[in-house]
Image (cartoon, coloured by chain):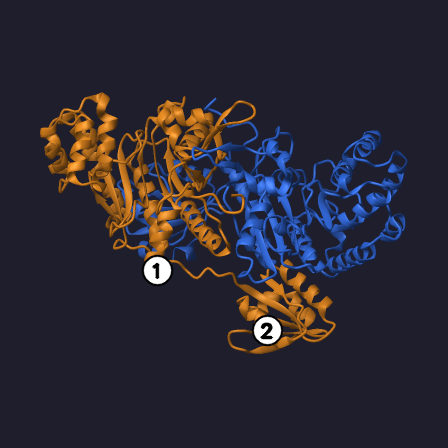
Chain colours: A blue, B orange
Amino acid sequence: MGLKAVKGTRDFYPEQMALRNWLADAWRRVSVRNGFVEFDGPVLEYLDLYRAKSGDEIVSQLFNFTDRGGRDLALRPEITPTLARMVNARINSLPRPIKWFSIPRLFRAENPQKGRLREFFQWNVDVIGSEDVLADAECIFTAVDFLAEVGLTPGDVVVRIGSRPLTAAMLRKVGVPDENMDAALAALDKRPRVPAEAFADMAADAGVPAGRVADLCAFQDAEDLSAAAAAIGEAPGVADEIARLEALMGRLAQMDVGDYCRLDLRMVRGLAYYTGVVYEIFDAAGSLGGVGGGGRYDNLLEVLGGPAVGATGFGMGDVVLAILLEEKGKLPDLAARLDAFVVPGGDGQAEDVLRVLARLRRAGVVADASMRANLGKALKEANKRRAAYAVIVRSGSVAVKDLATGNQASVPDETFLAEPKKYLQ
Amino acid sequence: MGLKAVKGTRDFYPEQMALRNWLADAWRRVSVRNGFVEFDGPVLEYLDLYRAKSGDEIVSQLFNFTDRGGRDLALRPEITPTLARMVNARINSLPRPIKWFSIPRLFRAENPQKGRLREFFQWNVDVIGSEDVLADAECIFTAVDFLAEVGLTPGDVVVRIGSRPLTAAMLRKVGVPDENMDAALAALDKRPRVPAEAFADMAADAGVPAGRVADLCAFQDAEDLSAAAAAIGEAPGVADEIARLEALMGRLAQMDVGDYCRLDLRMVRGLAYYTGVVYEIFDAAGSLGGVGGGGRYDNLLEVLGGPAVGATGFGMGDVVLAILLEEKGKLPDLAARLDAFVVPGGDGQAEDVLRVLARLRRAGVVADASMRANLGKALKEANKRRAAYAVIVRSGSVAVKDLATGNQASVPDETFLAEPKKYLQ
């Protein structure tokens, strides 16, 4: 058992690692240019942090254990509780709005399947300390900025935007009591993925009166906000939420990402803690699970012992995203390359090869070397390593050979080493 | 308990995260320019992987648990067993030498103290598939290349280089039986950190005859290799190992890092699996624990079910390194900065601010915005966010204000947005 990877985890050989780094670099670059700063927490947290946020049922979904000191610990299944804990600890000194992102490694004790692993990475982007709809727009814009950055178009992906307050108001309207609200939301969250009859059974179990399931579905499937509002009728907060959603869509249009975004009241999200807008990012074909999603969660910091403060954000995992990018042909060639491959131009040049190699590396040139005395074989190795140039070391000079064109120029040793990058571009 | 970080773990607020990223970026950059490619494995491995390598005693030093499927799992305390497992799985298809590096997050269930935490990062650099001393030299050069890259000089740090085969030969010479070899090596590893009498007791416990402790110490403290060789006398393999060490020091001198490196036979290293050269990196003042270390481990892949194949490498943790860099004043200013801070030049410009902001970000400019109508306050915010430029949005034009000099230029809106970086440098 010790000699293979645990099921649901991944070995990142260099080719997989290059992809992981390419994704993380793009996530980081896009976050930073959108004004977010990076944070991270520990992989190990007290189990109580997740219990406090999500109740006891969360425990069965995560890896947890009691350590030798008797502490109940868990491997983090998401970063948001850590984010709330960290922000709460410094709530009085952090200037608001707090715009933070993270790329945590997360762990879930569930059966692995396509797009869902036990160990994965998830980009998280959050704005804390603002109740303005602009904060939601900033998060959605940042998600779209990334999607566009990696070459995904509105024909490839769509951000479907729903509303917890409107959905809850409609559930109340059809007669779902408050104590059943979470169960009814959970049933609605599954609706897009199950047949109509199965949904009707789930809705009934969650307290939706049998005669009102059709009304509920009609609300979710409404063509526009006014139809949805009409379905709900008069109810507290509905007009405000409609106005917020309209403002959000307006902001997204002003930021020129409206073509990636669509109002869709079927979006509900699984987690209990959302309080406002919710959204999910899907591949347009709908053949994969969600690429990511998020929403507003204004109560979470308070639940974890902090103040009442607006909070909104999203997560995007690496597994489904990588599948989608591969399907769309958007993954670049990430094979490792060298700027220079240093080879001996004759016998007895091993010392000079090492000297030149070391100088190149210290100057920031990505370089490796061969000790093969046979020049033909050494050049073959240079090509195999995808070197741009071969540097053939002779006595007092080097020959710099462009491996793409075959052009070669001889340069005095020290002239070359004084400004190597000049000769390697 | 759920509301604070677990003891021995760290919360990475943006300022700590910036340092962590700065270190990881430097590790990665230096590894790549030295011809290494990155890999990683899972955080969760089967406990047996560590038992196979290090025996049952390792279990008390790591976080382990039995999951719901009855699997005995561990949080990785080091990456080398994973490296050996991964290489073994593809040993016939990977071109050699295999030059891999990694920056894993690691976990140890030990009491936290200065420089030692329960959760930390460790740069690992390994060459597998070569028994040539050049592979050892490549690893040590790469370590020094990094130390120099972050500004540490031979006055700040030193790589102390010892030899397992010579040390073992000397232990046999003074009468330590083979079955006591690991215990005697472990005692020697502790010698630099304990008083002479305490070491004498530990040596006796490990089977060193009382009358020979002084000889053993004299060997370790030898001024040069010939004195050490004389102390051992005739023994199998000693002349070869002396020649290897001399070749190694010669290679390091050819690569111009000899001034960072010193032969020091007191270096033994704690782990049982080393088979050749061993080394540790210390701060020159010797006030901190080791910054890193490594050596040759030619048997490990075979122990884990693979072929007999040469392997050598080192690890360098982030905790002691960060303390050292801080003490030496080598940490750069890592505060987050913006290229541009977009502000409204008058009332009713909120939509235009968003439009300009979005265009700047999509063009790769690190940008944020204020919606404050008061220009003075908005510019104050721009300074607080360390923006290089304020972009004041007017009707049809923008004013680009250099916040360092106060210089300001008005540019037509679309002219600016067509090539924003031209105006922001």
Quadrant of the rendered structure where residue A185 is? top right
| Point 44% across, 31% down: residue | B82
Q: Is residue B219 visible?
A: yes
Q: What element carries label 1?
A: loop
Residue A21 % position (x, y) = 53, 44
Q: Mark 2 points at which residue?
A: B379
Q: Quadrant of the C terminus of chain B?
A: bottom right
> Considering depth in this image, is A277 or B340 the residue closer to the camera?
A277
Mark 1 → mark 2, Cα distance in angstroms? 32 Å
- Left or right for A50, reference A280: left
Q: What element carries label 2?
A: helix
Residue B317 % position (x, y) = 38, 44
The kind of residue on which mark 2 rests is Leu
Q: Is residue B92 visible?
A: no
* Numbered label tally: 2
Q: Is residue B47 placed above or below B118 in the rendered structure?
A: above
Residue A44 % position (x, y) = 50, 40
Q: Is residue B297 placed above or below A76 in the rendered structure?
A: above
Q: Bin the neighbour count of mark 2 within 10 Å (Cα to Cα): few under 14, some 14-19, many 20 and up.
A: many
> Considering depth in this image, is B410 or A358 the residue closer to the camera?
B410
Q: Bin the neighbour count of mark 1 within 10 Å (Cα to Cα): few under 14, some 14-19, many 20 and up.
A: few
> Considering depth in this image, is B374 or B241 the residue closer to the camera?
B374
Q: Which mark is residue B175?
A: none
Q: Is residue B284 placed above or below A286 in the rendered structure?
A: below
- Left or right for A248, reference A37: right
Q: Mark 1 points at which residue?
A: B329
Quadrant of the rendered structure where residue B304 is? top left
- Left or right for B162, reference B354: left
The kind of residue on which mark 1 rests is Gly
